[in-house]
């Protein structure tokens, strides 16, 4: 089911959640963000899963996504995952993410991700249980 950034992204408890990996597939213009949600209210949607953004355009990432080795990241923290309506373009909605990346040596780096997307979907990982069950 396609969801809209402007009306549906806020329904997911992303703030203080974690990112397991982010992959961009330019041939289909899909951006996949594997996340673990944080709030008890999300038991209905599942705690772990993938947000798949469709028709992604104008993807900006600092540092570039292809330079991040997700296997070497000790942990992450989503500081922000918001819509930015002032940057919308036609039927594409603007999205801004700020994610803290904690490295094994204790250093912290920031991933800033900005892009336009037509829609997104949530694919829950039913094999992983909520910590609240």
Image (cartoon, grey):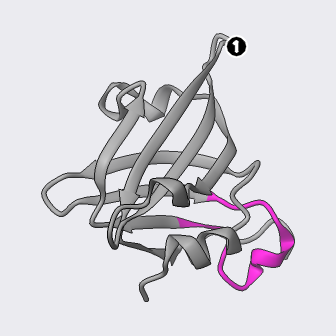
Residue situated furthest left in the rendering: 27
**Foreground of the two, 58 or 74:** 58
Q: Which residues are magenta?
A: 36-49
* Drawn side of residue 27 relative to residue 77, left or right: left
Identify the residue shown where x is 66% and y is 12%.
107
**Where residue 12 sits in the image (x, y, percent)?**
68, 69
Q: Is residue 127 visible?
A: no
Q: Is residue 48 on the magenta stretch?
A: yes
Instruction: Tally the numbered discs.
Output: 1
**Where residue 126 sits in the image (x, y, percent)?**
57, 78
Looking at the rendered structure, the secondary structure element under dot 1 is: loop
**Where residue 41 sits in the image (x, y, percent)?**
82, 77
Say above or below: 56 vs 113: below
- Location of residue 52 (image quadrant): bottom left
Identify the residue shown where x is 65% and y is 81%.
45
Question: Can you identify the residue that label 1 sits on?
Answer: 106
Q: Is residue 37 on the magenta stretch?
A: yes
* Drawn side of residue 63 relative to residue 8, left or right: left
- Location of residue 28 (image quadrant): bottom left
Say above or below: 103 vs 128: above
């Amino acid at each position: 089911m396609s969801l809209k950034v402007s009306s549906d992204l806020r329904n997911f408890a992303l703030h203080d959640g974690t990112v397991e990996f982010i992959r961009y597939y330019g041939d289909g213009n899909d951006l996949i963000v594997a996340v673990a949600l944080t709030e008890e209210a999300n038991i209905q949607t599942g705690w772990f899963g993938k947000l798949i953004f469709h028709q992604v355009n104008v993807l900006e990432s600092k540092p570039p996504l292809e330079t991040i080795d997700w296997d070497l990241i000790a942990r992450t923290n989503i500081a922000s995952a918001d819509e930015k309506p002032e940057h919308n373009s036609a039927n594409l909605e603007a999205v801004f993410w700020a994610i803290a990346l904690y490295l094994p040596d204790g250093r912290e780096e920031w991933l800033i991700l900005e892009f336009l997307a037509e829609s997104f979907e949530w694919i829950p990982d039913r094999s992983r249980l909520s910590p609240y069950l």
